[in-house]
Image (cartoon, grey):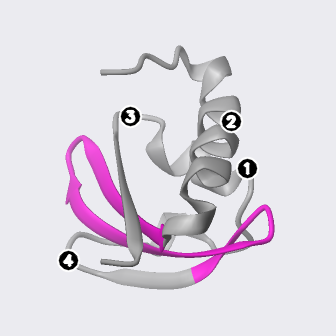
């Protein structure tokens, strides 16, 4: 109840996550998850699929909007589209 969930899907998903997180996303595989920070915001990444990459990101609800804006800013160079 206290988490916001953001899902990202596409060929450049890992590249977007690499922009704000120190974790090496090249080793993240399907059905694995990690806890880390993205631009200083603590979050959890759950890898749902790897062809194409699809991740579920969980963050404290109070940081959800800030993380969403950070992720969309990082996605712009890859042709970000909101669904």
Q: Is residue 69 above or below residue 47?
A: above
Indicate left or right for 65 with 49 as reference: right
Residue drawn at (62%, 71%) of the image = 24
Disc 4: which residue? 31
Residue 19 is labelled as 1
Indicate left or right for 33 with 16 as reference: left
Indicate left or right for 54 with 73 as reference: left
Task: Give how far apart the Cα atoms at labels 4 and 1 are.
Answer: 22 Å
Residue drawn at (31%, 72%) of the image = 29
Between 6 and 61, the one nearer to me in the picture: 61
Using the rendered view, name the quadrant where residue 55 is placed.
Answer: bottom left
How crowded pointer 3 is (Cα within 10 Å; few <14, some 14-19, many 20+) is rated as some
Q: Which residues are magenta?
A: 36-59
Q: Is residue 16 above or below residue 30?
A: above
**Circle 3 — which element?**
loop
Between 17 and 65, the one nearer to me in the picture: 65
Q: Is residue 47 magenta?
A: yes
Q: Quadrant of the C terminus?
A: top left
Q: Is residue 61 magenta?
A: no
Disc 2: which residue? 74
Labels 3, 2: front one: 2
Residue drawn at (49%, 67%) of the image = 61
Residue 11 is labelled as 3
How crowded pointer 2 is (Cα within 10 Å; few <14, some 14-19, many 20+) is rated as some
Image coordinates of residue 70 in percent, x first then y, are 69, 44
Using the rendered view, name the quadrant where residue 10 is placed.
Answer: top left
Task: Give how far apart the Cα atoms at labels 2 and 1 are.
Answer: 7 Å
Image coordinates of residue 60 in percent, x first then y, are 52, 74
């Amino acid at each position: 109840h206290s988490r916001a969930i953001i899902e990202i899907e596409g060929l450049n998903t890992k590249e977007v996550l690499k922009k704000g997180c120190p974790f090496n996303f090249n080793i993240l595989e399907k059905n694995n998850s990690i806890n880390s920070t993205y631009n200083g915001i603590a979050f959890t990444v759950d890898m749902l699929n790897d062809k194409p990459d699809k991740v579920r990101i969980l963050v404290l609800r109070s940081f959800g909007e800030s993380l969403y804006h950070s992720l969309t800013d990082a996605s712009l160079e890859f042709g970000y589209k909101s669904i």
